[in-house]
Amino acid sequence: MMQHDFLSCEKCKAELTRATQKNHVDKQGFVHSFCEKCFQTK
């Protein structure tokens, strides 16, 4: 079974692609994904 997991912005829940996602790694080492708009305003 192939799992298709798309990412979504943590703030606005918009679907992300590899081209549009912005990753932010917090102090604990967790990766958070945001769209460009939310990434700039986080």
Image (cartoon, grey):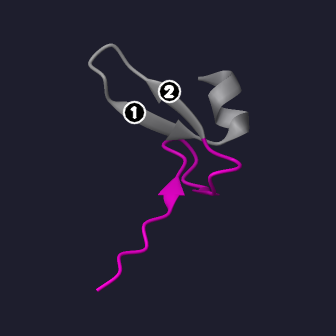
Q: Position of residue 25 (x, y in %)?
A: 42, 24
Q: Any mark on residue 31, and which?
A: 1
- The residue identified by callout 2 is 24
Judge by depth and name the residue closer to the eye, 4 or 34: 4
Judge by depth and name the residue closer to the eye, 9 or 30: 30
Q: Earlier in the sequence, mark 1 or mark 2?
A: 2
Q: Secondary structure at mark 2?
A: strand
In terms of image quadrants, where is residue 14? bottom right
Circle 1 Cα neighbour tier, 10 Å, few/some/many (<14 / 14–19 / ≥20): few
Q: Position of residue 3 (x, y in %)?
A: 35, 75
Q: Position of residue 31 (x, y in %)?
A: 39, 33
Amino acid found under the numbered disc labelled 1: Val
Horizontal placement of 12 versus 10: left or right?
right
Residue found 51% across the figure and 40% down from its top? 33
Circle 2 Cα neighbour tier, 10 Å, few/some/many (<14 / 14–19 / ≥20): some
- 29 lies above or below 9: above
Bounds of the magenta span? 1-21
Labels 1 & 2 near each other (Cβ < 8 A): yes
